[in-house]
Image: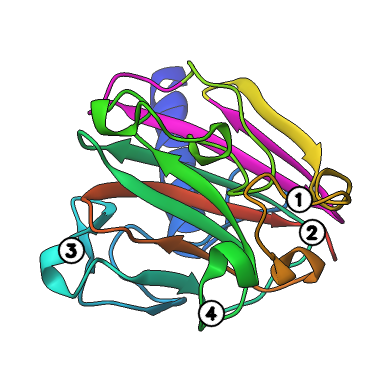
Amino acid sequence: MKKVTVIAKLTLLVCLTFFLSCSGQSNETGFIALFDGETLDGWVGNKQAYLVENGAIVVNPDGGGNGGNLYTEKEYSDFVFRFEFQLTPGANNGLGIHAPLTGDAAYLGKEIQILDNTAEKYADLETYQFHGSVYGVIAAKKGFLKPVGEWNEEEVQVKGSKIKVILNGTTILDGDFLEASASGTLDHKEHPGLQRASGHIGFLGHGDVLRFRNISIKDLSK
């Protein structure tokens, strides 16, 4: 009888977990799944280059231009954004935040770099261009990406002008983008998007193949 009870409880737990996943809810309080593992429902942008394969969003530049951008339908201000990503050799992408749906998100919003730091072609990049950096504004620490081909876990926390990036359990960036740019940006360019307090979150294609999965968000503005 006890064995049957344990099996029944385990079955119920599995069913509940599956239901929460499909309903867009996360097991952790306050987090909502942004990707159901099967479709691009809830996303807008280049759905010719961004495809769903084997439970992941795959950026396939051959599907449309250089890969283009894929954004959340909803806009967010303060949040915790979690995702996993898999790089291919030399891959370059970005995570746009507080972004409009048109224009260059690196300047009209903010772009957090997603990059294969180990690629020889990127050896001479500026510090603010490597993985995890707020492009042109704040440089992230290097050395915490997993080997190319393995899945990485990343969390991006945004509250007001403060931003923190945690890669595979290590904080690689913790700063304030308004304070960091008060005397000018690192790339010496105008970044009007630094003044934006809300916008879309998106993946910003640069012509390379990448994969994303387990994407969820906790909206801190509610």
Q: Residues within 10 Å of mark 2 (few under 14, many from 20)?
A: many
Left or right, 218 with reference to 19: right
Mark 4 vs mark 1, CA separation in Å: 18 Å
Which quarter of the rendered picture does the N terminus lie within? top left
| Residue under numbered circle 3 | 61
Q: Is residue 189 above or below residue 208?
A: below
Q: Which mark is first along the chain, 1 or 3?
A: 3
Q: Amino acid at mark 2?
A: Asp
User: What amino acid type should be assigned to the residue bearing mark 4?
Assistant: Glu
Q: Are marks 3 and 4 in contact (CB under 8 Å)?
A: no
Which residue is disc 4 drawn over?
Answer: 73
* Label located before the other in sequence (4 or 1): 4
Q: Where does residue 185 sit, x and y in percent of width and height?
A: 73, 50
The local secondary structure at tag 2 comes to loop
Task: Determine whether the residue tagged by mark 3 lies in a helix, strand or loop.
Answer: helix
Q: Is residue 119 left or right of residue 216?
A: left
Residue 159 belongs to magenta span: yes
- Other residues around mark 4 within 10 Å, as few (<14) / some (14–19) / many (≥20): some
Extent of the magenta region: 145-167
Determine which residue is flagged by label 1: 158
Name the residue that disc number 2 marks: 78
Earlier residue among tags 1 and 2: 2
